[in-house]
Image (cartoon, coloured by chain):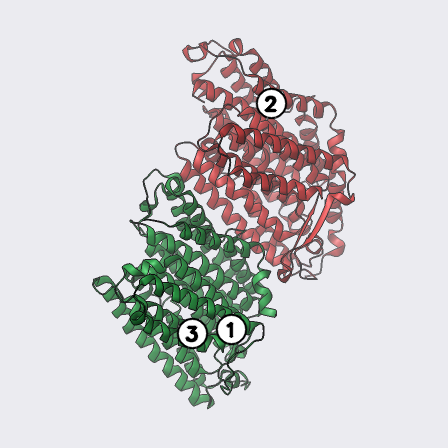
Amino acid sequence: MIPVLLILIPLLTGLAAFFFKNDKNVRLWSLGVSLFTLGVSIMGLSLKDGAGPLAFHGEWMQTLGSSFSVKLDGMGQLLCLLNAIAYPLVILATWNSSYKKANNFFALMLLAQAGMMGVFLATDALLFYFLWELALIPMYFLCSQWGGEKRIAVTFKFFIYTFIGSLLMLIGILYIYSHTPDHSFSIESFYNAVLSRKEQHTVFWLIFIAFAIKMPIFPLHTWQPDTYEQSPTATTMILSGVMVKMGLFGMLRWLFPVVPFASFQWGDFITSAALIGVIYASLIAIKQNDLKRLIAYSSIAHIGLMCAAAFTQNISGLQGLMIQMFNHGINIIGLWIVVELIERQFGTRKISELGGLAQKAPVLAVLLVIVALANIALPLTNAFPGEFLMFNGIFSSKTNYYLWFTIMAGMGIILGAVYTLNMIRKVFYGTTNELTNTAMDIKWNEKLALGIIVAIIFLFGIYPQFLLNSTVAVTDTIIDKFEMLNNTLPKQ
Amino acid sequence: MNALLLSAILGVVMMFSGILLKSKAAVRNLAIAGLCVLLLANILEMCGTIFFNIDTKGMIVFDNFSLLFNSIAFVSTLLYLLLSARDMEKVGVNYAEYFALIFFILCGITLTSSFKSLLILFLGIEIISIPLYILTGSDKKNLKSNEASLKYFLLGAFSTGLMLMGIAFIYGAMGTFSTVSIGAFTASKPSALLIAGMLLLLFSMSFKASVAPFHFWTPDVYDGAPTVFTSFMATIVKAAVFIAFIRLFDDAFGFQQKQWQLFIAILTVATLFIGNITAVFQQSVKRMLAYSSIAQAGFMMLSLYAMNADAKEGLLLYTAAYSFATIGIFAVLIKMKDYTFDGFNGFAKHQPLLAATTTIFLLSLAGIPLTAGFLSKFYMLKAVMAEDKNLWLVIFAVLMAAVSVYYYFRVIQAMYFKEGDAQPMEVTPAFKWTLVVLAALVILLGIFPDLLLIWFYF
C-alpha cells in the first residue's frame, strides 16, 4: 500500500488545496501533508526490499493491456525519499515569499509531487507515461503563472521540448509493446521483449531523446537555463532537484534493461556528448554574472557527469550515479535556497552588485560555504562518495576511450571548483557596497531548512553505506542484463 | 431501429411545435426531452429491447458499433443542446425549425452508422447534408452566412455527384449495392471499374470529412455559419461521417486494403500537415477551431489506414473525446464578445470555472494524458503500430500533435497568463454545471476508457 499512498496523498491533498481561501492556511496545509508524505516514505525505507506492502497491483484499462501496478524498490526508495524531503525543505525555505493566489501555487506543486512520485514507482509503461506527463503539466502552469518577465515564451519552449520528447517516448513504448510476448505494458513483459539489434537502435533513440531532454544533456539543454532563470525559485528547486532525476531514473529503469545492446553500442557517443556538455556548461558558468544562471549551468555540468556514469554500465559507475542522484538533489536545493534569500533581500541576483555578505550574514555564509563545498564534492561531504565511484566507474569502463573520458570528467570537476569558489568569493567576501551594507542575517525557518541540508550533507558524506546498500539490488539487475547480452540476443 | 424511426418522428414533431407552442422555452424543453427519449430508446436497443422490427433485407444492420456510436452522438447532441440551445434564439426567428433540422440530421446519422448498402449510405449522407446547408445559411441577413451556405451547397452537391458516380461504377462492376457482397469478392485482381468506383467514393467521403486536399470549404463554412451550428457541424456530423467512412471501407473494401492504403496514407499526411500548420497562423479562435477540426480529422484518418480492431474501438473513443471537447470550447466561444485570441486575455480572473473547464477541453484536444483526447490519440497510434513498419507515419503524426500544442496553448496562455479584461456575456449557473459535467466526462474517459468501450464488446 505504501507506493499507492505516496502517490495519492500529494494528489488528493493537492486537489484539496485549490479550494483554500487563506494564504497562511494553505502553506500550513502543504507543509503538513508534505511532512506526512515524508513520514510514509521513511516508513517505506524501513521495510526490507521486496516486502509485501511495497508493491501494489490493480486492474486498470484491461482492453489496452495496462494495469495500475506500482512498486517501491531500492532506487525508487531513494528518489521518493529525495522527493519527499525536498518538499518540506522548499516550503520552509520559501515561507516568506508571497504568491498571488497561493492556493493554486501550492496545489500545483503538490500535484507535480504526485506525478514525480508516480514516475519513480510505476512498473507499468503506460502508467509511467501518464505520470511522467502529470508531473510536467503543473510545472508548465507554475512557471508560466508565477515566473519572471519572459516566462510565457520561455516556459512554452520548455514545454514543447519535453512534450516532443514524451511523444517520441510514447512511440518507443508502443514499439516495445508490440514486441512483447504477451502484449502487455508491464515491466516484466518489457524486460522480456524480443527485439533484434536493428530494432533496439530504433527504440533506443525514440526513448532516449525524451530522457536526454529532461536531464538535459548537451546539445538538448537549451531550454534549461532560461527556464530555471524565469521560474519562481521554489519551482526551480523542484525542477532541478527532483525533476531532472526523472530522466536519469527513466534510463536506468526503462531503457538499459530493455535495449541493453543498443545502450552499449551508443554508450561512447552519448558519453562524449555528455562530457562535452560538462566542460561547455562549466566554462559558461564561470562567465555568468547572474546567480540563477550560474547554478543552472552548474546543474547541466553535474547531470552530464551523471549521464556519462550511467553509460559506464559497471557496478561502480551505476552505484555512484544512484547515490549521486539523491545527493545532487539535496545540494542543489541548498544552493537555490541561498539564491532565493539573496534575491529576496537585495532584489538582485547579479554577482557584480553583491559583495561582503559574510560580515553581515555570518550564519548564511557558513551554511553556504558548506553547501558549495558539497557541490564540488569535497571529501566528508555527501557528493564525494558518489563522484568518486562515478570516476572510478568511468576509468574502469570497457570502452576504448576511458582515459579521454576520465580526463574530460576531471576537467569538469576542476572547472566546477573554479566557478563555485569564485561565486563564494565575490558574493560573500570582499568589501560591502551600498546594497549589502544593510544586509541582515537569515530568519529561523531559513536557518532550519539550510541546517537540515547541511546535516544531510555530513550524514551521507561520512556514512554513505546506507544509501549504497539500498540500491545494490537494482544495480545488480541492470548489470545482469548487460552480462546476458550476448546469450539472449536473437541473431540478425 | 428505435433511434432511426424516433428521430424522424421527433423531427416532424418539432416542425409542428413551432406553431403549437408559443414560448421558445417550451420548444427548447420539448427538444431536450425528445432527445432524452431518443437516447433512452437507443440504450434500450443496446440492451436488447427493440420497439420496431422492420425487415430491411439486410440493408441496415444495427450492430454494437453503430448502436454505440449512435449513443455517443445522442449524448453529445444532448450536451450541445443543454449548453447552446439558448443561443440559437439569436440566430433567427425560426427557432423550432432549427431543432427539427437537427433531429433530421440525427436521423441521417443513424443511417450512416448502420448501413450495409451503398444506397443507404447515400441516403444518410444526403439527409445529413441538406439540413446542414440550411443551418449554415440560417443567419439570413448576414452576407457571410449566405456565402458560406452557397459555397457549401455547391461543393457539397458536386461531391454528392462524385459519390453517386462511384456507386454506379461499383454497381456496374459487381452487380450489387450490398457492402457485404462487395466485401465477399475475393478475386485476385479487381476490375478497373471497381477501383475507379472505390476511389470516387474515397474522394467524396474525404470531402464530407474535410480531409485535405478536399478541405477548402471547411474554414469558410465553419467561419461563416452561425457559431452555434458550427459547433454541431464540426463535432457530431464530422464524427458521423468518419464512422460511415470506416464502416464503408471495412465492410466493402477491407480485403483490398493494399489498393487504397497508400492513398489513405497520403491523405492523412496532407491533412495533418495542412490542418496543423495553418491553424498556427490563425488570429481568430473560431477559425483556429475550424483548422483544428481538419487536424483532428487527420488523426482519425489513421484509424482508416490501420483498419483493425484497435482502430474501430479507438475511432469510437476518438469521436466521443473530440466531440465532447469541441462542443465545450464552442459553447464558451459563443458567449465571448471577441473571437480573437486576445479576446480571451485575462478570462481566468473573471470566470475561473469556465477557464478551468476550457483548459481541460484544450488539453484533451492537444492530447495530454489523463484526458480522453490522449487515449484516443494513443489508440490511433497503437492501431497503426500494430501494422508494423509504419514508424514514419506515427512519428509524423506525433510531431504534428506537438505543433497542435502551440495553437491550443495560445488560448490557455491568453486566459491565464496575459492581462486583460475578457468578459463573457451572461452565463447561467446551469450552463456552468453542464460544462463541469462535460469536463468531468472528458477526464473520466481519459482515465477509464473501458466505461465506454465495454459496450463495444457487449
Chain containing mark 3? B
Nearer to me, A78 or B374 = B374
**How would you rate the neighbour count of disc 2 (Cα within 10 Å): few for under 14, some for 14-19, many for 20 or more?**
many
Q: Among the chains, which one is green? A: B
Where is residue A44? Give x, y as percent. Answer: 73, 37
What is chain A's hue in the picture?
A: red
| Residue A15 lies in quadrant | top right
Chain containing mark 2? A
Residue type pointed to by label 1: Ser
Q: Is residue A182 visible?
A: yes
Nearer to me, A212 or B90 = B90
Q: Is residue B41 above or below residue B224?
A: below
Q: Nearer the viewer, mark 3 or mark 2?
A: 3
The answer to whether residue A438 is left or right of residue A174 is left
State the residue position of label 2: A449
Question: For residue B66, which numbered disc appears in the image?
Answer: 1
Where is residue A457? Give x, y as percent. Answer: 66, 23
Residue at image point 36% right, 40% down = B346
Return the disc, 1 or 3, that comes first in the chain's sequence: 3
Whether the residues at callouts 1 and 3 have beta carbons within 8 Å, the answer is no
State the residue position of label 3: B7
